[in-house]
Amino acid sequence: MKEFLKYTFATVCGLILTGVVFTILGIISLAGMVASTSGTETIVKDRSVFVLELKGNVMERYQENPIMQFLGEDYATYGLDDILTSIRKAKENDKIKGIYIDAGAFACQTASMQAIRRALVDFKESGKFIVAYAGAYSQGTYYIASVADKVIANPSGSIGWHGLSAQTMFLKGLLDKVGVEMQVFRVGTYKSAVEPYIATEMSPANREQTQAFIGSIWQQILNEVSESRKISVDSLNALASRNMDLQPAELYLSTGLADTLMYKDEVLAYLKQLTDCKEDEKLNTLSLEDMVNVKRNVPKDKSGNVIAVYYAYGEIDGDESADGEGINSEKVIKDLRKLREDESVKAVVLRVNSPGGSAYGSEQIWREVSLLKQEKPVIVSMGDYAASGGYYISCAADWIVAEPTTLTGSIGIFGLVPNAEGLLKDKLGLNFDVVKTNELADLGDLTRPFNEEEKALMQGMVNKGYELFTKRCADGRKMNIEDIKKIAEGRVWTGEMAKDLKLVDELGGLDEAVEVAASHAKIERYTLVSYPEKEDFLTSLLNTQPSRYISSRMQENFGEYYNGLRFVKNLKDADRLQARMPFDVVIK
């Protein structure tokens, strides 16, 4: 019997060990196959066309999710960095004759769309063509596509052109129903990130600031489309008031919004004509995935000088494991310290795309940026957002470059602590009792509301945080603190408005920020290196958490309301003091 058990145990152990070994070998083999496929250099054929699909979701920098690759992803995600680099490659490669914009459902913030559009304007300087087509242009995709030499609409299609609206989702009614009260502590008349929890509509101050920044964004869209389509701003505004989404396609031609009407097969035939392809020949096309693996024809720099572009995007000290976005303050500090100590790095461009987050985490990153600045130039490039905590980590830089439609500022602090007594006691019938050694030992307990002493302590902490935040901004921008406070109060500004207020120095994108960095470092030749380095497939697979796949599916289903719901989910683990802008403003 003993021998039987011994052999049985040995057999079971052998099977388990064999299973583990084969699993590891399978993962390595699969990773190798995918990595070899994704890393293969794309060979560009003569008379090729880069097909730029304006479909899916765009984020600042995209790291492929292995689980999504295995299980399939219905809603594609692209990195803004890959799109901009691919357009630049297409301009430089003589074998690529033009770009075909294939527009569809496209989730992209305005500043990122502005960066893509500017890259396409630069592409046109090469003399190559840009053709745009869609069955149904959204207003955002039309804004980008309007730069094309020929804008083509479907005879039964539509062009979105209706102006901007900004919608905020308010949760107070829901919280009242479930018996949860949000205890709010804030500084700043315009610090409206807390309003969804304590109100059912925008405050007058919030309405004022929202009207101002969407008005600024809309005016820029009007000006740029007007220049490209040769239609007056007044005419474009009048067309938007008619809501062109629901107008007949023929009207797009008569008003100048489109150049011609075609079906998809006719567009393909037209592209063949532009590339001198015969009717029976196959049109050579390159997707974004292909373009990522096209090598640039740029001579290798031998100076040894490096300009580092460090990407900091997402919520500060939020749950970055959920969707791959997020700024982990401890990691950022370590990375920036390495760049500070690396003598080959002559300047750092800090690419910030963040609505803010933890006030504590923001202060720690500010400290490291300040130390880095003592050793070498630090230039900030702002993306879609650099607001509240996003502005906090930017203000110490030598120079700030923002997109005209970047949402920035929001200099303010708030605290948000839920009181679930109504839910737990009144609705669920749960009772709690406590024994404590000191009077305030259970401060912040979710089962009861704050008392007056606790409220005073919490508000004092928020006030102190606000004073520190405004001081950091005043010191960094070399402004009087009273002048900073006049434009602070939690108010959100566009990059264009912020430049007039001296919160930013220059309008432009990442390329302009790199040029400024080279100028400040007094170097002409350099190598541009992006940090943090993207993970290879195997590392990404081992680091991917199941929650990221679940989060991706939730984002796909909830769409524009996902960020607000995620904030509620993470509230229990959030820093008590938050420096962030209104998270759930949906502009469309």
Image (cartoon, rainbow, N blue to C red):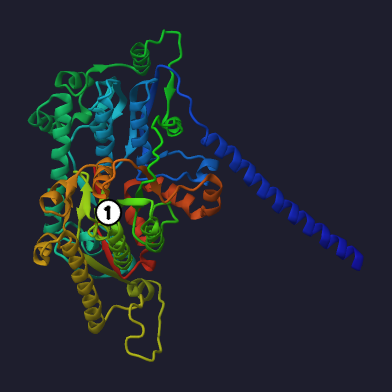
Relative depth, front residue between 167 and 326: 326
Residue placed at 43% from the left, 25% from the top?
A: 286
Residue 311 makes an appearance in the image: no
Q: Residue 475 location, x and y as percent?
A: 17, 64
Residue at the image point whose x is 16% and y is 55% from the top: 503
Q: 412 left or right of 340?
A: left
Is residue 273 placed above or below 580 in the rendered structure? above
Q: Which residue is mark 1?
A: 377
Locate the C terminus and report the quarter of the image it occupies: top left
Q: Nearer the viewer, residue 542 or 263?
A: 542
User: Who's the residue at 24% across and 29% down the image?
Assistant: 121
Could you say which quadrant of the image residue 85 lies in?
Answer: top left
Residue 356 found in image quarter: bottom left
- Which residue lies most toward the bottom here? 437
Locate residue 81: give its quadrant: top left
213 to the left or right of 23: left
Identify the residue at horizontal 59%, vertical 43% (top origin): 31
Local secondary structure at mark 1? loop
Expressed as whole percent of the image width and height from the top left, the position of residue 365 reads: 32, 63
From the image, which quarter does the N terminus lie in? Answer: bottom right
State whether residue 411 is above or below residue 80.
below
Q: Is residue 538 above or below residue 44?
A: below
Q: Amino acid at mark 1?
A: Pro
